Amino acid sequence: MWKRKLNNFFMQRLSLGLFLFVLSLFAQSAEDPWLHLEKASQAARKLSYKGIFLYQNHQDIRSIEITHLNNGSEEFARIVTLDGKPREALSRGNNMVVFNPNKENVMIQKRQNQSLFPAILPADIESVKAIYTLRFSDQERIGGRDAQMVYLEPKDEYRYLYKLWLDKEYGLILKMSILDQQQKIIEQASFNQIALFTNQDLNWFKPSVDTHKKYIMDEVSDNRISDEKYCTIANLPAGYREVSHVTRMMGNPPQLVHQWVFSDGLSFVSLFVNPIPKGHKSRIGETQVGASYVHARVMNGNQIMVVGEVPQGTIQKISNSIQDVRAH
């Protein structure tokens, strides 16, 4: 009798274990795969970490050190270029100060329209879902950590393919590759070393440049031009929307330049419009600078330039979306 009870007991435990195993498989299969991207987006902003990553854009290769802290209410970051010409950036929230010691120049600007590795994903990835397909691939080791490789495959010809390596534990993007239509890498960033920390000390949040020098301050105005219709833009590529319109003084002699930034959530394209000064030649045509395409044309006495690390057809379509510019 006791043997029969014991057998029944083990069979019940086995059946329960099998049921729980099948249930866990069902839960995994039912999990929204885009939750991994949401986790990656939040990790880059909410975690505190320090690391060195190798950045490659066309022929430009450099090592960059990043320190990022989130104290629960604000984000702080210090980004230092370790190779070539010294350059250093400090950001607090959406405010960024960029130090260029060689040029003795300090630029003050807003950060909201920049995607700085590893924070390349938007806070809300709904826009990305509409224009990219998510596909999981192999697992690899990046910077000494286990990572899951995923593909963001574009649904049309107006954007590039993204390969992302997500930290298995925290979701942080450890490596990123952007590939063109020929599967050629046009931009890449990968952590060589990365460490998370919990210390709230901000002693590191200061520039290492010579503070005794007199630096030229160049502040980018972030006042949106809403009272005047300077430029009419319509029929942007699917998924792209205007995320900012700022003005700044540029050129020699200095003149007011309007800059619009358009984004699909991952890639960014800039549109520059300014009156052509008397005696200055205009630029017309297309060119490629590194991984960026540039399209230039003239309308109503204004120089129009569209620049971005996107397919050439995207640049052309955005340029053709400019239907009218105030005459000069």
Image (cartoon, rainbow, N blue to C red):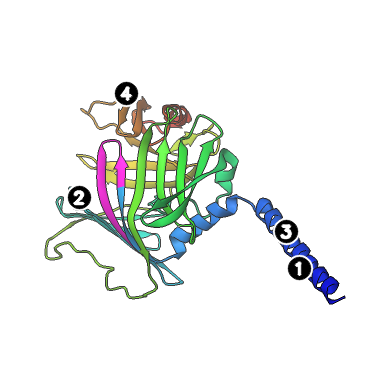
In the rendered structure, which disc, 1 or 4, sits on the residue that comes first in sequence? Answer: 1
Nearer the observer: mark 1 or 2; the answer is: 1
| Mark toward the viewer: 3 or 4 | 3
Q: Residue 3, image x and y in percent?
A: 82, 73
Labels 1 and 3 touching (C-beta < 8 A): no
Amino acid type for the residue under numbered disc 4: Ile
Residue 144 image label: none
Q: Nearer the viewer, mark 1 or mark 3?
A: 1
Q: Secondary structure at mark 1?
A: helix
Residue 327 horizontal side relative to residue 152, left or right: left
In the rendered image, which residue does mark 1 sit on? 13
Q: CA distance from mark 1 to mark 2?
A: 61 Å
Per the image, the residue denoted by label 3 is 23
Disc 3 from disc 4: Cα separation: 62 Å
Report which quarter residue 204 is drawn in.
bottom left
SS state under label 2: loop
Tag 3: Cα neighbours inside 10 Å, few (<14), some, or many (≥20)? few
Q: Which residue is mark 4?
A: 284
Residue at position x 16%, y 58% in the image: 215
For the point 69% across and 56% down, the residue is: 27
Number of marks in the image? Answer: 4
Q: Which residue is mark 2?
A: 83
Q: Residues within 10 Å of mark 4 (few under 14, many from 20)?
A: few
Secondary structure at badge 4 equals loop
Q: Residue at x 36, y 40 (%)?
A: 187
Q: Amino acid at mark 2?
A: Asp
